[in-house]
Image (cartoon, rainbow, N blue to C red):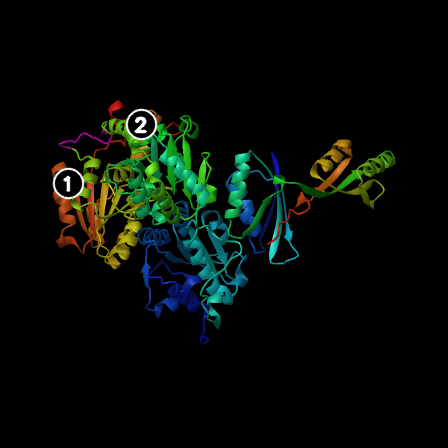
Amino acid sequence: MKSEIITGAEIVIRSLQEEGTEFVFGYPGGAVLNIYDAIFSQTKFKHVLVRHEQAAVHAADAYARATGKVGVALVTSGPGATNAVTGIATAHMDSVPMVIISGQVPTHAIGQDAFQECDTVGITRPCVKHNFLVKDINKIASTIKKAFYIAATGRPGPVLVDIPKDITAESAEFLYPKEIHMRSYNPVTKGHLGQIKKALDILINAKKPVVYSGGGAVLGNASAPLTKLVNLLNFPITSTLMGLGGFPASDEKFLGMLGMHGTYEANMAMQDCDVLLAVGARFDDRVIGNPDHFLSKPKKIIHIDIDPASISKRVQIDIPIVGDVVSILNDLIEVYEEQKNNHDKNQLEPWLKQIKTWKSKNCLAFEDDKKVIKPQRVIQTLHEVTKGDAFITSDVGQHQMWAAQYYPFDKPRRWINSGGLGTMGVGLPYAMGCQLAFPDAQVACVTGEASIQMCIQELSTCKQFHLPVKIVNLNNRYMGMVRQWQEFFYGNRYAESYMDALPDFVKLAESYGHVGFKIEKPEDIKPVLEEAFSPKLKESLVFLDFITDQTENVFPMVPNGKGLSEMILAEDL
Amino acid sequence: MRHIISLLMENESGALSRVSGLFSARGYNIESLTVAPTEDASLSRMTIVTSGSDEVIEQIIKQLNKLIDVVRVLDLNDGKYIERELMLVKVKAGDKHRDEMKRISDIFRGRIIDVSDNTFTIELTGSSSKLDAYLESLDGDAIIETVRTGASGIGRGDRILKV
């Protein structure tokens, strides 16, 4: 290779190009001006100028979730980096592969309380998979290579690279390493065959089995082998919020989402099963509720996960299988094929019958109203109008749960939301990331009037980059989930949960050059949604402000700290 | 139960804070933590004394292994090991206590490394519990100042932590 002497800033850009970066989401500032200058004269990737650094990280995060590739964000030092922290923590909690490049004050100024200086590596340390401060121009390329490698392998996560301004101005030879070897980082890939055989033995002898799949099955691209294995075993399957779409929701074996707002059948089956196969899920508090209650019914638990630290963290696991989920599921399928004659599927009949009985409770039924818009109806209609084939992003709260419950996903990477950190404000930047990655796809952001205002400035970014996302605003004039908890657990004392002084969202959208509709009557839901997704508005961002029932609650609900089978159902009230 | 965990990690800036940050973020105990470069300057060796249930210790080991810069982790309590800690103690040693202080120090195989009219400074090495026992054997009023390094540990015989 011929040697090339270029600036540190150009090395950053060239390294990103070497990694196949399509989009860099960012916001310029003093410490990254050299890098922006290098961006000015390149055409290989597109820079997306957001209106707040938080949105840059969220949009890069959504790009990663929707495509499976590493998302890239670029921010300046100090406030640029601190604004990015919420986005980084959000990606970290949901194990999203990302590289964040942050500018830093010049090396000689570090520690001097310089203008726009902060200890970015220190501040982000607890919310990244790893981070680096590069102090030597000769290490920029190898560090970026490492960052992409660490972000995308093992249990994925965000990696931050902090680069002082002075080294982006220096010049050095550019050599991008072809591969990287780290003695301290060697993620496991293949699962242990002995454990896999043991697991299969338990699975084929199970009388009341359930498969419980999580975000790991989606992130690990395991949809196909998961679906195949579940079909072979003929087991019922439930999914976490993050796992939705990993197994097709329209399949009758699918029990719906489990957990705090999971279906009756999913939660009852989780509680009552004798064998549980967990696939890329982590038994968190919103999923299994109280762990002691969860284990009060004895069950054998098999847990497939790429992260050894997820095994036996909240619940003791009988058969852990650590490794890449696709490889493990394929091994399980192979071992099953050898042993399928030993699997007597008749033994599942009583269990499947029991599940049918639970299903017949129809726990997601809701009463439609002639005068007031029910939020559930909006989501169901959205599903109908988009033929179940849209990218749905959401913010956090009641609307998020309704989207998860009433928009069944048949494909992975279509449901983009903040599960772990629960970050209000992600919805719109998430929609931007999806729309940029898939310009021709239908992208809807399901949100509420509280969440949408947390990153509302991105309406401007959407205008600049012609992103025709459809915003489905379930406007109940409350922080709905806060209100729901206050109603149930705080004696109807609605402290600060009312959204007063709301803007006219239609005018707001129009002021940014978008299209807005206010929908107040139930009979208008469908025609307006159809119009929003019609060819006429294909190029337009449409803000759909649905004025919904103020007091609607999300059911079923497992109260915090309770067991999965201690759900409150709509019919109980 | 008390555990001594040894680990090797890349000798990078900020390595220590990754470990101490992990312990504080996840609410694990640290009784002591010592760190210094090894004979291979690219590696640091750390000894962490912690306590917790078996489940907590298992999580600590896994979480430490998960840190990108950590190369190897060993729970010394999984086998036979030797533990040593160094303590410097300054005690009152006026006319009245001088002989007594010398005697107790001898019993614990301490070395008097500094002497003034009214004080001795004693250097003592041993397991942490031996150092505790020494302090307990002194009249509390006699202790002017103590400084301890925290425990270092190493496996016995063929138990080796190396890259």
From the top left corner, tell me how far across and down residue B109 is, in percent: 80, 40
Q: Quadrant of the C terminus of chain B?
A: bottom right
Which quadrant of the structure image shows residue B110?
top right
In this view, which residue lies farthest toward the front?
A: A341
Residue sitting nearer the eye, B52 or A268: A268
Look at mark 1 in the image and give the residue it sits on. Answer: A525
Residue beneath the point at 53% across and 36% down: B56
Which tag is nearer the camera, tag 1 or tag 2?
A: 1
Q: Residue A220: x and y, percent?
A: 36, 49
Label 2: chain letter: A
- In the displayed structure image, the side of residue B65 where residue A573 appears, left or right: left
Q: Which residue is mark 2?
A: A487
Q: Is residue B93 magenta?
A: no
In the rendered structure, which amino acid carries the disc numbered 2? Glu
* Same chain, labels 1 and 2: yes
Label 1 lies in what chain?
A: A
Q: Nearer the viewer, residue B161 or A519?
A: B161
Q: Earlier in the sequence, mark 1 or mark 2?
A: 2
Kind of element beneath mark 1 = helix
Q: Would you say residue A119 is visible in this rendering? A: no
- x and y, in percent, of residue A207 in the image: 34, 30
The residues colored magenta run A362-371
Q: Quadrant of the N terminus of chain B?
A: top right
Q: Quadrant of residue A568?
A: top left
Residue drawn at (27%, 57%) of the image? A436
Badge 2 density bin: few <14, some 14–19, many ≥20, Cα 10 Å: some
- Answer whether residue A491 is visible to the viewer in this image: yes
Seen in the picture, residue A214 relative to A130 is either above or below; the reply is: above
